[in-house]
Image (tube, rainbow, N blue to C red):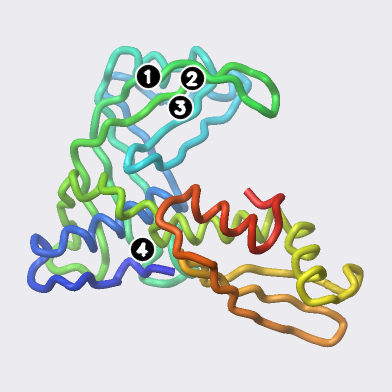
Amino acid sequence: MTSLDHRSTTTGPWQSEPARLARAARSILACPAGVNLVVDGVEDVLGDLGESGGELGMQDLGGVPTFSSPVGTRLAAAAADGRRALLTLESGVGRPGSTEREAVVTLGGRLETRGLETCECCCDERETLVLVVDLVVLSQPTAPGDGRQRVPVEHFRSAEHLLNGGYLQRSTEHANLCHQDELRRAVSTTTGTRLADVIGVALADLSPAGVDVQWVDVEGSHVHRLVFRRVASTTEELGELLRTELHAGLC
């Protein structure tokens, strides 16, 4: 996976490597360990979520923090008013205890509504809200000075960062946690091992070009590097390749 310290082919001070900084910031947005949201003029903007009977979901859609909120919350009202907000994200990228986990990205912008949607699981209506980002500040312990670096917004929104390290890590964690049955069946089918003998499976080092499949069976532990038939360039392509090469039930 891509490290927050990964260098682009450009050199020089941070102003000359906006792509590296943008990729690091997008990785944190895709894989945060902690989230804090402050909205101008609204005290404890998330305090009524429990009263509304639901939780707030968040994802990165092309560099746009996108929230799925219960209807009628303070946050939804703030978005309808177009209030400014500050979103602070602690890094969940990398291994616990690594310097990557010490990074923080701060996103400033204006909240907007994007209409209602119906949840496929429970059929409840939810409101889609976005933060239209106009300020990105990345804080890294390895950066010069006070560690804070301004990231150009146009680079932060670039489509070249769709398959960032945070997204790849989060996708791997989701597959390992939520799709163990599908992964065990995939290994059983491709290796000819009885399903009952496949004890556990884990994906690792997911990239647009392939993924490591690690599994344990009655004979011991194994690892196989699965190379995709083509290199994915979008999240949709990556998902389709995982389903085609491993199991149709993966999402």
Q: For numbered disc 2, what is the local secondary structure?
A: strand
Tell me which label, 2 or 1, sits earlier in the chain: 1
**Split into 4 quadrants, where in the image is the N terminus?**
bottom left
- Please determine whether, in this image, residue 201 is positioned above or below residue 70: below
Q: Find out whether the residues at labels 4 and 1 contact each other: C-beta distance under 8 Å.
A: no
The answer to whether mark 2 and mark 1 are in CB contact below 8 A is: yes
Mark 1 surroundings within 10 Å by alpha-carbon count, few (fewer than 14), some (14 through 19), many (20 or more): some
> Residue 83 at what x, y percent from top left?
27, 20
Name the N-terminal-most of marks 3 and 4: 3
Q: Earlier in the sequence, mark 2 or mark 4?
A: 4
The CA span between labels 2 and 3 is 14 Å
Q: Residue at x 52, y 70 (%)?
A: 210
The residue that label 3 is drawn on is: 46
Q: Nearer the viewer, residue 129 or 231?
A: 231
- The amino acid type of the residue labelled 1 equals Thr
Q: Residue tagged by mark 4? A: 102
Distance (Cα) linking label 4 and label 1: 32 Å
Q: State the residue position of label 1.
A: 113
Nearer the viewer's eye, disc 4 or disc 1? 1
Q: Residues within 10 Å of mark 4 (few under 14, many from 20)?
A: some
Amino acid, disc 2? Glu
Q: Secondary structure at mark 3?
A: loop
Q: Residue 78: x percent and y percent?
A: 35, 17
- The three-letter code of the residue at mark 3 reads Leu
Q: Identify residue for label 2.
A: 127
**Is 215 displayed left or right of 82 in the figure?**
right
For badge 4, the amino acid type reads Glu
Give the total of numbered labels: 4
- Estimate how packed mark 2 is, as few (under 14), some (14 to 19) or many (20 or more) residues with alpha carbons within 10 Å: many
